Image (spheres, helix red, strand yellow):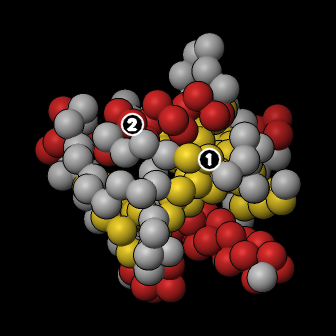
Amino acid sequence: MKEIILNKAKLKEDEITEVLEKSRIVLRNDDDEIVFTRFGRVYFLPGGKIEEGENPVDTIKREVMEETNINILLDDIEPFCVVKNYLRDYESKDGTLVNRLVTTYYFTGFTSDDNIEYFNNTRVEREDNLRGFFIDIDEGIELIGDYNKEDPRATYLALETMKVLEEYKNINLENE
């Protein structure tokens, strides 16, 4: 499993005030397209926060089913990469600034479902028009490159997603 460290702000372990774990998936269909999620003007791969009592596999299955109603088949129960993203002075939901470490486990998987339905969204997800769609991976990378550079969340997710998709493409090239 590849470990990717993103620490542009050179945050040290003893400066971290908040730790968060997530699971996300590079989910492809029969046409070798992948699922992207759009939330406001932020694009990322499907997934979410690991809840208490869950492991990363449980989380990705729950998140994808809750948010898209898509059944998935994981390629492996081990993630293909993990990203440790160190974020200095990140604005949390309540407006306070935190030094956050986000560890995200990335899986690969397959779905034969082409219909993405969002039926179990939170109020905020509905208000910001959370949507998923299938896209060619190279078109997706190009789309991510056009993120809102004024939005810290968009910035960290865009950079992280681009690194993960590059690693995914490298692994697929090695396996061909």
Q: Is residue 112 at all visible to an observer of this figure?
A: yes
Q: Is residue 32 left or right of residue 93?
A: right
Residue at mark 2: 65
User: At numbered mark 2, what does the secondary structure look like: helix, strand or loop?
Assistant: helix
Q: Is residue 145 at all visible to an observer of this figure?
A: no
Q: Say which label, 2 or 1, has the lower sequence index.
A: 2
Residue at mark 1: 74
- Tell me the quarter of the image containing the N terminus: bottom right
Question: Residue 50: x percent and y percent?
Answer: 57, 29
In this rendering, is residue 114 above or below 148? above
Kindly indicate the quadrant of the structure image that contains residue 136. Answer: bottom left
Closer to the camera in the image, 5 or 62: 62
In this rendering, is residue 140 above or below 93? below
Closer to the camera in the image, 25 or 115: 115
Question: Residue 76: x percent and y percent?
Answer: 72, 47
In this rendering, is residue 31 above or below 59? below
User: At numbered mark 1, what does the secondary structure look like: helix, strand or loop?
Assistant: strand
